[in-house]
Image (cartoon, helix red, strand yellow):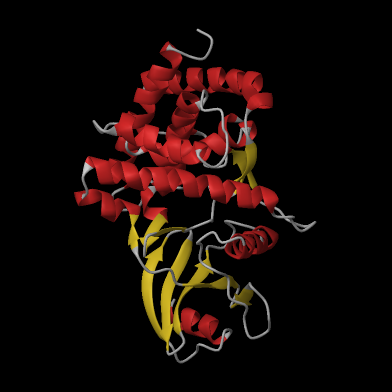
Amino acid sequence: MTDLAKAAAAEWGLGGARLRFIAGRENQVYRVTDDAGDYALRLKRPGYRTRIELESELQWMAALDRAGILVPRPVPSIKGRLLEQVDGHLVDLLTWLPGQTLGTLLTDCSDADAQVLFQHLGRDMALFHAASDAWVKPAEFSRVAWDAGGLVGEAPLWGRFWAHPGLSAEDKALFEAFRAEAAQDLRQMDAGLDRGLIHADLVRENVLISDGRMGILDFDDGGWGYRVFDLATTLLKFLDLPRFPQLKEALLQGYLSVRSIDTGSLDLFLALRAVTYVGWIVPRLGEEGAGERSHRYVATARHVCQRYLSNPPGH
């Protein structure tokens, strides 16, 4: 893969630059370093996204950069294109954002400092949503939809969570009951929910802090959806912490300082976010460590689904 990465870097005039492998899942990511600076070279997983979806992602990120949102900026190739094809692989190049992830900073910080970070994140999330709304999309813009079909339809974006092969009979029945209830509740709430472009993966690893600013990474799964889904995605991994209520309040305070949003559906979207991970892990069950992750995802989803079904909206 390194030879492919070197050939891809040459499309940007970086054939002689230093390459260091960083991560590999949906993308094979390399840090590219030369005298001009550092970049992220991304070799796309074949079949995960269409060419037009990938081009739309890059156009969106470029628009966010112009609006003052801190995101990796797409870099045109020598040929002036944001996306190139090299040996059958679609490839792009982004500016490298320095800094520490939110997860790293939260490891040792006080509760008060954590609340400040979450307040800033809520504000920046709202600014990101507002900038996405203000952007005039190209006619051919196309991204996935985290709508009711993408969450609880017959073919959810991250897989049929209720059909996970490792589920007990009780968990399978629970997730099927939640899916039916969630579909009904989404139909009833739909008109009042704020929708637009969302990141859809605003976990702590995808938030980077540098020089007092927060940057947003990894738009692979970004698309059309419910704005409260982004809030739920950030909060889910902190659900079991004693300071969760304070982090939740700080995140919502920051968001509401910029734009309004109805958070009455947050419990539903926490559960929806949790079950997506159960579906996501299914095609990856053969990977190292997947068994432990699967157990954790199912346990979290079980907890939030049980809680939601015991007290759904209007009950």
- Quarter-wise, where is residue 155 in the image? top right
Outermost residue on the right side: it is 139
Percent position of residue 74, x then y:
58, 70
- Residue drawn 67% across and 59% down? 56
Percent position of residue 29, x then y:
44, 69
Instruction: Tell me: residue 293, above or below residue 264.
Output: below
Outermost residue on the front side: it is 257
Left or right of 63, for residue 215? left
Between residues 46 and 245, which one lies in front from this camera angle? 245
Percent position of residue 147, x then y:
63, 35
- Residue drawn 54% across and 81% down? 8
- Quarter-wise, where is residue 306 in the image? top left
Q: Which quadrant, please, contains the N terminus?
A: bottom left
**Is residue 278 in view from this perspective?**
no
Left or right of 225, for residue 218? left
**Is residue 281 in view from this perspective?**
yes
Percent position of residue 123, x then y:
48, 45
How many dots with numbers?
0
- Residue drawn 63% across and 75% down? 84
